């Protein structure tokens, strides 16, 4: 995002990387009239705005396009009839995707929760003030705090898994034997081996935030995960217990594979 400084008297028309820098230059200007500082969005953003921002007067006019005047497959006509290559839209999509991912990464590394809280926690919404100190720029963020009723269930699951080495199906059967003491994640539902596995493999129970464990429903390598610092929220299990539960899981799966 750049800014332009335009003066009608002297014809000054310089560009600055920030609007604040353009305003400072406007204050140091020597003409009697103050130059106008206007922001300039990226070129792909201007094309996107031209594409979708159709004036109301244009909507009332019906245009007929002949078959001979059709644009090629790699081009697109905007509201004014100009041709826009698909590369412009692809650049816009890539830039917005990059910004959205960067924003998600910053939230996760700061320790904030994205999406519904995992079983055993509840989301507490707090107001975070902008680092510059402007109260008007404060936003609501969610942090994880333990839920007194379901947090004990998570701790018991890790004890059965890490210390006793029980299988996921056995743990699910024990949980279903007493629904009042071990409420299921889904109201009026039942525990399953898949649900127990999802809890045992969730890194958030160690006090860390994690994101991008899956892409398009497929698991990603641990090196590609986005994680926060340790203990950004209260952990329900320690690191040793968590890793012990994963080792038991690997041993169990390896045993099933060898038996098969």
Image: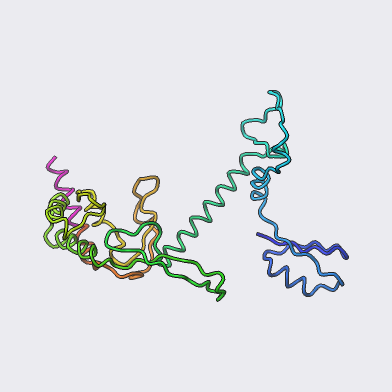
- Count how many numbered circles sit on residues in the image: 0
Identify the image quadrant of the C terminus. Answer: top left
Q: Quadrant of residue 232?
A: bottom left
Q: Is 2 on the left-hand or right-hand side of 199?
A: right
Rendering coords of residue 155 (x, y %): 20, 64
Which one is in front, 69 or 73? 69
Magenta segment main secondary structure: helix
Q: Is residue 31 above or below residue 96?
A: below
User: Residue 212: which quarter of the image?
Assistant: bottom left
Membership of 252 in magenta stretch: yes
| Magenta extent | 247-260
The coloring applied to the image is: rainbow
Give the side of residue 70 with respect to residue 173, left or right.
Answer: right
Work out whether 113 lies above or below 186: below
* Between 156 and 88, the one nearer to me in the picture: 156
Q: Position of residue 130 (x, y in %)?
A: 53, 71
Q: Is residue 68 magenta?
A: no
- Determine whether, in the image, residue 181 is placed left or right of residue 29: left
Q: Residue 230: image x %, image y %?
A: 34, 69
Q: Is residue 110 above or below residue 173?
A: below
Residue occupying the point 73% across, 73% down: 24
Q: Position of residue 180 (x, y in %)?
A: 16, 58
For the N terminus, give its image quadrant: bottom right
Name which quarter of the figure residue 12 lies in: bottom right
Where is 193 relative to 68, above or below?
below
Position of 51 with respect to 7 (left or right) is left
């Amino acid at each position: 995002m750049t800014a332009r400084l335009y003066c009608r008297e002297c014809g000054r028309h310089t560009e600055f990387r920030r609007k604040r820098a353009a305003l400072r230059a406007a204050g140091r200007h020597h003409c009697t009239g103050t130059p106008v500082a206007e922001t300039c969005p990226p070129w792909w953003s201007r094309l996107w705005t031209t594409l979708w921002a159709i004036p109301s007067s244009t909507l009332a006019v019906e245009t007929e396009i002949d078959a001979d005047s059709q644009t090629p497959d790699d081009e697109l006509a905007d509201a004014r009839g100009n041709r826009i290559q698909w590369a412009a839209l692809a650049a816009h999509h890539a830039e917005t995707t990059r910004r959205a991912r960067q924003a998600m990464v910053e939230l996760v590394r700061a320790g904030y929760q994205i999406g519904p809280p995992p079983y055993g926690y509840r989301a507490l919404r707090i107001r975070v003030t902008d680092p510059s100190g402007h109260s008007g720029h404060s936003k609501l963020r969610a942090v994880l705090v333990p839920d007194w009723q379901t947090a004990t269930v998570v701790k018991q699951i890790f004890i059965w898994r890490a210390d006793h080495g029980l299988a996921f199906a056995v743990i699910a059967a024990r949980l279903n034997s007493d629904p009042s003491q071990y409420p299921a994640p889904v109201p009026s539902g039942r525990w399953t081996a898949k649900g127990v596995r999802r809890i045992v493999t969730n890194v958030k129970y160690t006090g860390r935030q994690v994101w991008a464990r899956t892409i398009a429903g497929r698991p990603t390598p641990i090196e590609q995960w986005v994680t926060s610092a340790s203990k950004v929220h209260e952990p329900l299990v320690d690191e040793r217990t968590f890793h012990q539960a994963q080792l038991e899981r690997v041993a169990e799966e390896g045993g099933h594979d060898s038996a098969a």
